[in-house]
Amino acid sequence: MPEGPRIPSSAEHYAQALLALARAEGRYERWGDRLDLLVQVLADPQLAAPLANPSLTIGERQGLVATVLEGVPGVDRETRNLALLLVASGRETVLPAIRAAYRNAVDRAEGRVRAELTTAVALPSDALARLQGELAQRLRRTVVFDHQVDPQIIGGMVLRIGDRIFDGSLVSRLRRLRQRMVSEATTA
């Protein structure tokens, strides 16, 4: 997904540390997978509720997380250590932001940009590929699309790249036309 809401600086720091580890291993994807897994496990309401309980000590929270992670396939020592570190520092709730910051950092490192494309109807793969190629040429980066269909935009498209939004939807054009007509009617 493209950059969304502002990512806390603490999440950025963790993401940069993980990026350095991944770069040393030569495997960005592996840490991305680890973060995806931890987000999924720690978001489970059966674990999230006890972790949010202020009456549990840090040690008890870490013990709970360690026990849960033992039964999860794909959790290695590094993944477990990261989870326990986050719990010890009270930052387990920042994990989704760490994952987003890590993904953004990997994209930058690999010369990639994520774009969220919304259209009223599904686009054929050749049209998506053509648009993706044109954007890549203009941005001089590889473009990865997250294509969503939203019939409420009526027609056209909305493209979001990072914090920039290019709204060419029919619903926005109609809204602007309406505003212009109202404005002209009140001045006439």
Image (cartoon, rainbow, N blue to C red):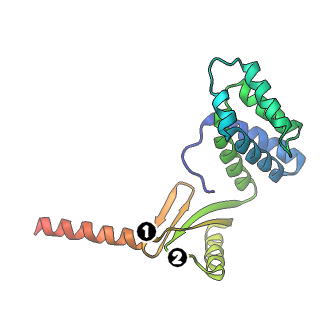
In which quarter of the view is residue 92 placed?
Answer: top right
Q: Is residue 159 left or right of residue 23?
A: left
From the top left corner, tell me how far across and down residue 37 is, in percent: 76, 46
Q: Find residue 177 and name its label.
A: none
Image quarter hosting the C terminus: bottom left
Image quarter hosting the N terminus: bottom right
From the top left corner, tell me how far across and down residue 18 is, in percent: 78, 41
In which quarter of the view is residue 16 placed?
Answer: top right
Q: In the image, is residue 137 above or below residue 11?
A: below
What residue is drawn where x is 69% and y is 34%? Answer: 47
Helix, strand or loop at mark 1: helix
From the top left corner, tell me how far across and down residue 161 is, in percent: 57, 60
Three-letter code for the amino acid on which mark 2 is drawn:
Val
* Residue holding disc 1: 152
* Residue holding disc 2: 121
Q: 143 or 111: which is nearer to us?
A: 143
**First in residue order: circle 2 vs circle 1:** 2
Do tag 2 and tag 1 residues touch (Cβ < 8 Å)?
no
